[in-house]
Image (cartoon, grey):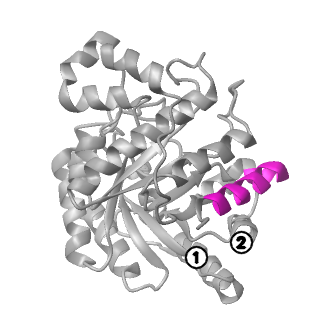
Amino acid sequence: MVLVGAALLLGSVAWQQPKPPAPLAGFSFSPLISEWAHRDPHADLGLLLDETNPDLVRLPIYWESVEPTPDQLDFSEIDGLLAVVARHNETAPNPTRVVLTIGARNFLYPELHEPGWAGPRWQPFLNNMQAAPAYRAYFDASITRYRDSRLVYAWQVENEPLDYVGNVSTGDDQIKTAQLSWEIGEVHRLDPSHEAMTTTFDGWNVAIDEIQLYAKPALQLLGGYPSGHPEEALEAGDALGLDMYIDGPSTPLRFTSTDLREAWKEQSLAFWIARANSMGKDVWVSEMQAQPWADVSGQFNENDLLTSAADYRREHVKVVLMWGVETWLEHPAWMAAATKAMAILRSR
């Protein structure tokens, strides 16, 4: 509790450091975003690429899309998205590469993208299905199909695999540690040329990170507030991806200013970068909030996006992927802010 109090007092302090190398900057895109809005995913992705000219774009290889039946593999969805990136690169000033996300847990609601034929959407049924030949065929075929593509920058293995994010569509959908280990090992075996990164959501304060790491039972004093699994994710993959949100319905101490919460996020980022570097690994901001939270009357605005970009630019982060393209597509002001934020992140 003393650490929490100290963090509240020091949260707004910005420590001056030499400017580190610029991270690779980009965004996440799922075709589901466009389909839900009755738009063309290829046209949306092309527009986003042309407007922002990102270094990276994160794309999902959804199990439910690739394996519609246990004995059928269909990669047409991801092939089409990669073709859009390739066409963009024909005239872009700098080429865009892709981070491909594979696994049962993948980004965007409902988090667990399991085909209907696979059975119950919770453990232990999920783990049994992931050990079955059909799932492993999807997983291995995804790697071997794209490992030689010049577009591929890295793999993301599962999305927040160790975190509980159950919803009305799923129950206990945390990926077992043994399964995650197998999947990361399989990427290493089949594609030793590219890193295998995995993600977790970030705790709301560096004090929580320290308590979780060094005095985990003390979290019970805070009601066992969920704070992600950054240490476990860091140990599991080649790099740690942190999902960092400033304002949303579950944000603790939401009565504080966005400026203060942005400072907390930067401090947490610096904490995990130092820890990752001690292990010879890197840290990504795998999801940087770049839109207001849907259906929530919040404080996060375009200026907060730019402030976050400036904050994260001060840290030795390898990759920053922004989250919020559905808002950018609907609101030109947010598209302009995202483009400016990307420029801030990549400034020398």
Q: Is mark 1 on a helix, strand or loop?
A: loop
Q: Which residue is drawn at 67% across and 55% down?
A: 341
- Image quadrant where residue 317 sits: bottom left
Q: Is residue 341 magenta?
A: yes
Q: Position of residue 161 (x, y in %)?
A: 33, 45
Q: Residue at x 49, y 41 (%)?
A: 244
Distance Cα–Cα, label 1 vs label 2: 12 Å
The residue segment tinted magenta is 328-344
Residue 107 visible in image: no
- Indicate which disc, 1 or 2, sits on the residue closer to the N terminus: 2
Q: Where is residue 5 in the image (x, y as percent from the top left)?
A: 39, 15
Q: Which residue is drawn at 46% across and 30% down?
A: 167
Q: In this view, does 5 lie above or below 270?
A: above
Q: Name the residue under label 1.
A: 96
Residue ranking furthest to the right: 332
Q: Mark 2 points at which residue?
A: 46
- Amino acid type at circle 1 is Thr
Q: What element carries label 2?
A: helix
Q: Are marks 1 and 2 in contact (CB under 8 Å)?
A: no
Q: In this view, does 328 lie above or below 84?
A: above
Q: Position of residue 176 (x, y in %)?
A: 21, 44
Residue nearest the viewer, comparing 63 with 224: 224
